[in-house]
Amino acid sequence: MADPGGGAVCNGTLHSQSEDSHSENCTENGAVREAQQNGNSNFYKPIVESFEEAPLYAVIFTYMGYGIGTLFGYLRDFLRNRGIEKCNAAVEREEQKDFVPLYQNFENFYTRNIYMRIRDNWNRPICSAPGALFDVMERVSDDYNWTFRFTGRIIKDVINMGSYNFLGLAAKYDESMRTVKDVLETYGLGVSSTRQEMGTLDKHKELEDLVAKFLNVEAAMVFGMGFATNSMNIPALVGKGCLILSDELNHASLVLGARLSGATIRIFKHNNMQSLEKLLRDAVIYGQPRTRRAWKKILILVEGIYSMEGSIVRLPQIVALKKKYKAYLYIDEAHSIGSVGPSGRGVVEFFGMDPRDVDVCMGTFTKSFGASGGYIAGRKDLVDYLRVHSHSAAYATSMSPPVAEQIIRSIKFIMGLDGTTQGLQRVQQLAKNTRYFRQRLKEMGFIIYGHEESPVVPLLLYMPAKLAAFARHLLKRKIGVVVVGFPATPLAEGRARFCVSAAHTQEMLDTVLEALDKMGDLLHAKYSRHRKSARPELYDETSFELED
């Protein structure tokens, strides 16, 4: 991969891969012939995903709810402007009344008049480690959720169904964390320097070597913040004259990195190979706008597991396409590393593929590893280039030494280098818990999204009032959940998002499922009729045009 100013960065020979002849996911997109060159039987793992449509009445009532909320919002804004109702939101200063307004946009209107009604379901303070059980600080509001006050009561032993603690490694201190304590005593907490100055420690080098070994790649580089791993490194890899093809459901860090790069960005429908191939074909045929020169680089941006949909990337098909059209592939495994694959090595292992098929492997340590930060891994020349040109390496403070030791400890645990098989057992337990939880929810009649082996489980609730009632009632039953609505999801697709953990016991899951069954009946949220999705971008490979 060449950098925007010239000079080789990474990626040597393009390696061919194959698919099994029985695959149905790539039969019409031109990638089959590209992928039939060898006999790797693991190339196509069956993709079993669900994106069931909502009943028409649920969609109608959802939009009606937002419509009524909007009408009352305008009425309340009118009352606020006349001084009849107190305005607690940010407003323009009187001396700036003739300026272009900073706050008057739809998002702010939505925050004032709809989000505030259900704001108590977010940002709940936790006062314990985010294990399978955690403690929540009780709070109440006296002004309709504009401000909160603590009651002094602690809600003990709430079942944690919201944290990304997939392997249960984010836990309170025990003797297995002795090495982290020793590193804290030796190195202290902070580094107070960047990687390019005096911030590279032997612990960082040890961690990077271990990450490369874990992923079976040549080299790796670690960073102190997962979000910045994407947003600060993508601009170092592509620039003006380059083309980025990005999945429409990519995380905000990927979107920000793509925008900061200055490259041209085109969006393909989620996991839709025809949409992606059309963009690739047009890019090769027509080149850059106006000049028609060939693109310097074409970079495909995808995620391993999509955190709002619970879907898994169709990696074999994307690899076949990227080889056919000589593009590069950047995959964000923030949610998939440690949580999928026979030994927790992410979607590359999940599909039985060669790590060399992915040009840039990115992941974070914030989920499965119970720490913070991220990594970029791949060929050695790629990593060496980023050590010099990465904005994060040049300007961001290095990873804290105790955090680095926690990641080292976690990776050794997963790989079995601690002399036990407990890490592998946790990976297997996570898979077992995930399948059990998803299957039970389907049997109850809920609409859930995503792949059957994804530990991220979105349960569709649609209506904003049901989001609030769902989270509030479950907390009373000592179950902590995350509910998600606009703008993190489409307006009419509000949902609860469960994160299954290896630390969850059968008893815990059954307790949650029993409560969900009752909540589904109480809120009439069991919408499933086992119908095929009405969203062609998620299910139908024959539709590939993006909507305006």
Image (cartoon, rainbow, N blue to C red):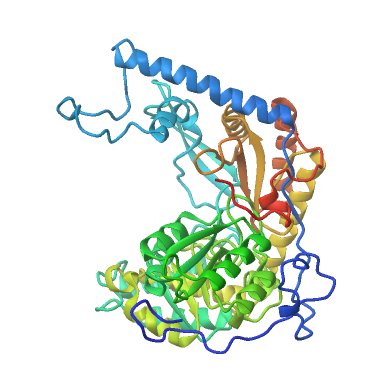
The quarter of the displayed image where residue 18 is located = bottom right
x and y percent of residue 237 in the render? 41, 74
User: Closest to the observer: 353 or 334?
Assistant: 353
Relative height, residue 471 to residue 47 (above, below): above
The quarter of the displayed image where residue 75 is located = top left
Relative height, residue 38 to residue 376 (above, below): below
x and y percent of residue 462 in the render? 63, 34
Residue 30 can be seen, yes or no: yes
What residue is shown at x 70% (from left), y 69% (from top)? 425
User: Closest to the observer: 500 or 466?
Assistant: 466
Question: Of all residues shown, which one is farthest toward the bottom?
Answer: 13
What residue is shown at x 69% (from left), y 70% (from top)? 317
Horizontal arrangement in the rendering, residue 47 relative to residue 190 (left or right): right
What residue is shown at x 67% (from left), y 65% (from top)? 314
Horizontal arrangement in the rendering, residue 506 relative to residue 143 (left or right): right
x and y percent of residue 321 in the render? 64, 73
The quarter of the displayed image where residue 227 is located = bottom left
Question: Of all residues shown, which one is farthest toward the top?
Answer: 84
